[in-house]
Amino acid sequence: MAAATLTRLSKPYSSSLSHFRRFISSSSSSSSAAISSETTNPPSSPFTFNNTTALSRKDPKDRNVQWVFLGCPGVGKGTYASRLSSLLGVPHIATGDLVREELASSGPLSHQLTEIVNQGKLVSDEIIISLLSKRLEAGETKGESGFILDGFPRTIRQAEILEGVTDIDLVVNLKLREDVLLEKCLGRRICSECGKNFNVASINVKGENGNPGMSMAPLLPPSHCMSKLVTRSDDTETVVTERLRIYNEKSQPVEEFYRSRGKILEFDLPGGIPASWPKLLEALNLDDYEEKQSAAA
Ligand SMILES: [Zn+2]
């Protein structure tokens, strides 16, 4: 079984995955021991990413995975990244969350961020990188090993800066056929009372021209939310299509950056979570890892 799944992996990153497999089959104690209790705190300036020695580069066999998740809005990237993080015992670091946390805190960048957000401006690379750097350094101090990044890098410049400070083993590019993605985005609903998210789209695409069909069940609300569902004003076909166009335009150079380094794993989601999760584990050569984990639990 393992041999069969290995053949699906292309050569460039199978070596880092074999390091990873060696890591997961061995005890994790060596990785935490590698982190000195005397790790010094990063300088207090909010822009410290020039200090590229702040993060230590470890051999992949001595640490957990350092992965990036790419995927357009609505693809479910956060869900898959978060599930894999729990499975592998690494933090799921979403840059959107870092910005929200900083805004809610009295951190050094919160004032600046509030102004940017109030003026409707985009948060600059410098700020995002500074927040991410701070998060990674804090994690390293706490003894975290590895990470799954979600929402970063978004530009070539961010990818280059990231490459300057740490090693990325693998970039998982999650993809979903565009007609399905659009339908899914248009099916999003929020309960105006409790604020929970649902999805009323019931996707059932028949297979044709050798392409497999696809079905995704809706995520329906309990009856007490049903009559209070609202659609976000920016979930219209025009806005969603434009959002996808902009995403594709911006993400292609980033994908190409990692493709040229042999680090990208293209993954076409075959459906919703029940259909996609086992396939994703298989593609990542983790299908028997989950079984081992649950057997050990
Ligand atoms: Zn509700």
Image: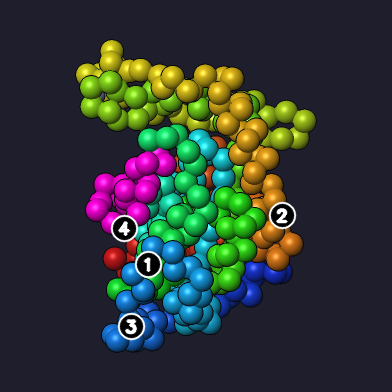
**What is the magenta segment's predominant secondary structure?**
helix
Is residue 167 on the magenta stretch?
A: no
* Ligand 1 lies in quarter: top left
Q: Position of residue 11 (x, y in %)?
A: 71, 69
Extent of the magenta region: 100-117
Report crowding for label 2: few under 14, some 14 to 19, many 20 or more residues within 10 A (C-alpha). some
Q: Position of residue 74 (x, y in %)?
A: 50, 35
User: Which mark is nearer the camera, 2 or 1?
Assistant: 1
Considering the image in quadrants, where does the C terminus appear? bottom left
User: Which mark is nearer the camera, 3 or 2?
Assistant: 3
Residues at marks 3 and 2 touching, judged by CB atoms closer than 8 Å: no
| Residue placed most toward the observer, 272 or 157 | 157
Q: Residue furthest top?
A: 227
Q: At 40% across and 19% down in the image, what residue appears?
A: 231
Instruction: Give, as a three-letter code, the residue at label 1.
Output: Ser
Lateral position of residue 19 relative to residue 117, left or right: right
Q: Earlier in the sequence, mark 4 or mark 2?
A: 4
Residue denoted by label 2: 256
Residue denoted by label 4: 108
Considering the image in quadrants, where does the N terminus appear? bottom right
